[in-house]
Amino acid sequence: MPRYARDVAVVAFAQSDHLRRTDELSEVEMVMPVLHQVLAQTGLKAGEIGFTCSGSSDYLAGRAFSFTMTLDGVGAWPPISESHVEMDGAWALYEAWVKIQTGEADTALVYAYGKSSPGSVRDVLTRQLDPYYLAPLWPDPVALAALQAQALIDAGETDESALAAIGARSRDAARSNPHAQLSGAVPQGGYQVAPLRTGDCPPIGDGAAAVVLAAGDTARRLCERPAWITGIDHRIEAHGLGLRDLTDSPSTRIAAERAGFFEGPVDTAELHAPFSSQEVVLRKALGIAEGDGVAVNPSGGSLAANPVMAAGLIRIGEAAARIHRGASDRAVAHATSGPCLQQNLVAVLEGDRA
C-alpha cells in the first residue's frame, strides 16, 4: 500500500440533480447550493477551508476565465487560497490532495461543474483533438468511441448485446440515485454511430459536484467514517489515436498499480465510462470480471448522468459516500479525460475497519 506524508480523506460529498437543461440557472446559481450542502455536512464555514480548487471548461462556458465567475458561489470574503484546473474535477481533487500533502492546508474544498446544454457538446469536444491531423476532420466523441467499440467487437471482447446489457444495468442501478438524469428502463434506440446506439452513449446535461478533503485527526473530527485516499495516481496515453491499442488502457493499469489498487480486493468500483464499450476496456485494465463480487457503478455511472468536467469527481464522491455510510470498505474510483480514455486517474479509498 502506498505511504504518503499525510493521511487524507474525503469527508463530505454533494452533487446537484443532473438535468438535460438548466436554462434558468447560471453556473454560479447551479454551483452555490452544492457548495452549501457539502460544507453543511462538515459544519465548516467557507473561511475555515484551507484551500479551494475547481475544475471546469471555458469551451463549455463560451468565455475565457469563466471559473472566476463561479468564485462568487464560494464567497468573496474572506480572501481564499484558490486554484483551478481546465479539466475534470477529479484532477482538481488531485491538486488539492497534493496541497494537503505539503502541509500547506489541512482542509480543501473541491468543486466542478459543466453546462453542456447551451451548445453542441459533441462539436465542442472536437477542440481537444490534435489540431493538425484529427481536429480538421471533426470526429466527435461519439464517432471516436464507436471506433473503440468496433475494435473491441472485432477483437472478440464484446458484442452489441453485451454493450446493451451494460447500459441497462447502469440505468437500473440509478433507480436508487435521486440525482441521476436517466434511470430505469431506457430504450436502446437507434445507432448514433455504429456500433453504438443511443443507450450506449451518455446523456447530455448540466450538473455540479463538490467534495471536502481533510487530513488526519481533522478528518476524523469532521466525519464519522472518513473515506481515506490510500492511493491516487494519473497517467496519459499517446495523443495520436493511431499510436494506441484502443481495446486496452495501459495508463489506467499503471495508475491503478501505483495507487496500490492491486494490493487487495475492492468491493466497489466507480468507473468513469461515458460509453458502454469503455466499461469493457476499464474492467480489462483493472482485472474486474463479471461475478467477482464487485459493485460496478452502483450509482449508475456516467451512463446515468454525465455532466462534463464533473463526472470524474462524482465517481470519487460516490465511492467515498458508500464508505461513509458503511456500504463499502475498499473502493476504487476512476476518472477519464480526452477521447477514448486518453488520460486516466485512479484513486483507492478505504474506510476505517471496525
Image (cartoon, helix red, strand yellow):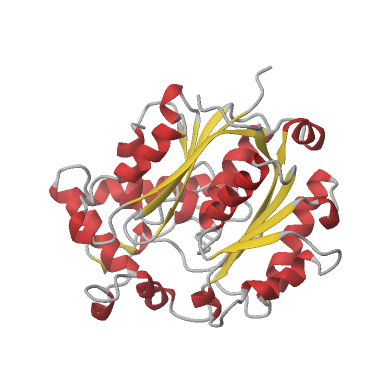
> Looking at the image, which is closer to me, 106 or 343?
106
The quadrant of the rendering that contains the C terminus is top right
Q: Quadrant of residue 215?
A: top right
* Residue beneath the point at 33% across and 31% down: 287
Residue with the most extreme left position: 154
Can residue 147 be seen here? The reply is: yes
Q: Position of residue 281 (x, y in %)?
A: 30, 45
Total marks drawn? 0
> Looking at the image, which is closer to me, 303 or 64?
64
In screen coordinates, is 167 left or right of 306?
Answer: left
Q: Position of residue 153 (x, y in %)?
A: 18, 49
In screen coordinates, is 32 left or right of 113?
Answer: right
Q: Is residue 245 above or below residue 82?
A: above
* Residue beneath the point at 62% across and 56% down: 179
Residue with the most extreme top position: 354
In screen coordinates, is 32 left or right of 304?
Answer: right
* Residue beneath the point at 60% across and 45% down: 98
> Looking at the image, which is closer to me, 165 or 222?
222
Q: Is residue 326 above or below residue 57?
A: above
Q: Position of residue 141 (x, y in %)?
A: 34, 67
Q: Position of residue 241 (x, y in %)?
A: 23, 60
Can residue 191 be seen here? The reply is: no
In screen coordinates, is 89 left or right of 251?
Answer: right
